[in-house]
Image (cartoon, rainbow, N blue to C red):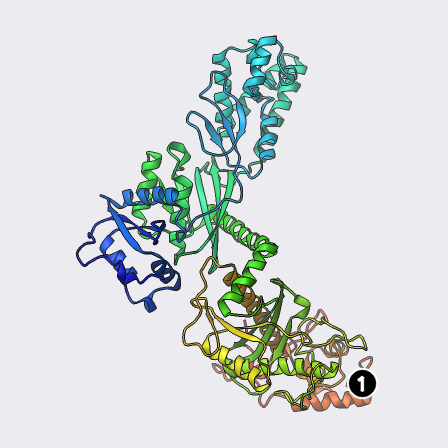
Amino acid sequence: MADPSSYRPRPGEIPDSPGVYRFRDEHRRVIYVGKAKSLRQRLANYFQDLTNLHPRTRSMVTTAASVEWTVVSTEVEALQLEYSWIKEYDPRFNVKYRDDKSYPYLAVTMNEEFPRVQVMRGHKKKGVRYFGPYAHAWAIRDTVDLLLRVFPVRTCSAGVFKNAERTGRPCLLGYIGKCSAPCVGRISPEDHYELAEEFCDFMAGRTGTYLRRLERQMAEASDEMEYERAARLRDDVGALKKAMEKNAVVLADATDADLVAVAEDELEAAVQIFHVRGGRVRGQRGWVTDKVEEITTGALVEHALQQLYGEETGDSVPKEVLVPALPDPVEPVQEWLTVRRGANVSLRIPQRGDKKALMETVQRNAQQALVLHKTKRASDLTTRSRALEEIADALELDSAPLRIECYDISHLQGDDVVASMVVFEDGLQRKNEYRRFQIKGFAGQDDVRSMHEVITRRFRRYLAEKEKSGEWAGAEDTPVDGTPAGAPLTAEDDGVVGGPKDDDGRPRKFAYPPQLVVVDGGRPQVAAARRALDELGIDDIAVCGLAKRLEEVWVPGEEDPVVLPRSSEGLYLLQRVRDEAHRFAITYQRAKRAKRLRSGPLDEVPGLGETRKQALVKHFGSVKRLRAATIEQIQEVPGIGRKTAETIAVALARSAPAAPAVNTATGEIIDEEEPDPTGGSSGESVSAGLPDDRRGQET
């Protein structure tokens, strides 16, 4: 690890002008390329106290061994040079978008005597018209097959063309009317070239002219009673309309635009681009990148635009580029796009209307692409193995943690405090092993104390299971919640029932120990978890915490966190485990809170199920009327006996409001309900599910 002060330039050496800089490692490999409006100000940010740097930046400057720069005249030149150097050096600490495939284009070789329509991939060639990119090559072939009825352009390879020229016989497409057969002289080079231009015009969105022309010819043929020709023209019109349906109109004003959307988390980002030409979506593509440097959404957009248009010129750069966030500053990027196109380019965020709605669609595609990428990455066995090995190395474990448990605390301003436990085995989720807890040892908000309670309760159950199976002989112990050791958990404690079974066939709770306990939090939460395990005499389970702000890994007893590289598969796995625990905890907390808010006085009646509660409310119309009823009237409800009626009356009397509601403006006593003519409940029956002190506060 290098000390940045060892290669820091002397004061005054760095010019105060636009430029591009490169960090190199000890082997002279370029590891980072950046641009700056002022090289002096930008580079000074890298040579400050390491503790003030973001972990990703800290890792870069300690890996580097030297820095050099190149001065340019304008920020636009800096943008272009940065792109060129990133392409040339492929630096490890720069954002690098990677295609999951090479996107196919529909290409028309207008640089040949007889232009050919074909599928092309890779770098674009001069003199070739490109349309797309398409998601699949078969989509291009389907479109071309429909259009060849109207525009019978050559599609054969050079070898097939020369062979047909030599033999004087066209290929099959020439016989069935899907090729004008220039190979045997059925059409002149000039006419065939014009046919190819018409094909390109149609693909570029100028469709109305050809449809109107064919419909006019069809009507003329019908008037002249040339019905066979009229039928062929009718089929041609149908083929063109079917080809147009494959690219539905999304923007009514025939807009040419590219829409760029970004979905990101702390480790990765996915970019999706929709290419809209003539108001229709003509192509789609996407990239995924590891966020190996500290970067904003605007900077991600800037890098995406560099990759998207770095090799493009002319009409390949559209008049309008819509993005979710603007680069900072935006002017150099917009000027650079204008230079690439040779005309003004608008770079902006859509605010309303069809363009904003389409941007939301692109954003959903980006989010789905990121989820799909994560799913594929998590399912790869080699990647999972490497992640577990990296975690073991970073935490100095004896072996890879094949079973990882993660705990998270969730609450809403101190109310409904709950916790979650999620389990990953071999890097994969084990949802049937998930558990959830209510915090019972105290009231209020204290994440550290809550974590201590949850870890204690979970591992008391584990020790009880070992004692029950004869694997461990320890003293009787009482959990924090007062439940005897080994006793079954309540419904609130369990998440999804599963796992090993007892002799009676019931699931065993907490039977397996993890090799690693991960807590969502920093040093205090980690210390609480370690203390809970020490109090139980458990010393063979490792503990760490993942702090969300900087993704630092905290280990008990250490003053400084362990910082895993941002591209580390181990950090990626820890993040997935932590995020899953957070999701599971907050889902339970919200459900518990919703259940509390829906609870009413009838919920306090022992033995009264949902069916009889609904029958009571339906019979009386509301809880208010039920509260005013006599025991004999309550007995009239089917299924309600005298003893149950007495219990209901007592429970409702205890929960009666202290005073009627009063309109503070008029002094009028508010009647809380009116009968519901539908037979359902209204008024108080609607608010009866809320505690008295929360009515009217929930939206």
Q: Horizontal and vertical percent for residue 358? A: 50, 47
> Depth check: 639 or 621 in front?
639
Q: Quadrant of the C terminus?
A: bottom right
Q: Horizontal and vertical percent for residue 165? A: 57, 10
Residue lying at the far left in this picture: please name it. Answer: 12
Few, some or many residues within 10 Å of mark 1 (<14, 14–19, 20+) = some
Look at label 1 and name its amino acid. Answer: Gln
- Residue at 30% in and 60% down: 46
- Residue at 80% in and 77% down: 503
Q: In this rendering, would 270 be left or right of 315?
A: right
Count the marks: 1
Q: Is residue 284 visible?
A: yes
- Residue at 61% in and 22% down: 149
> Depth check: 381 or 419 in front?
381
**Element marked by disc 1:** helix
Q: Quadrant of the N terminus?
A: bottom left
- Is residue 125 depicted above or below 344 in this figure? above
Task: Write down the quadrant of residue 549 in the picture.
Answer: bottom left
Task: Write down the quadrant of residue 59 in the picture.
Answer: bottom left
Q: Horizontal and vertical percent for residue 110? A: 46, 22
Residue that mark 1 sits on: 635
Q: Is residue 625 visible?
A: no
Q: In this rendering, would 481 be left or right of 58?
A: right
> Depth check: 296 or 683 in front?
296
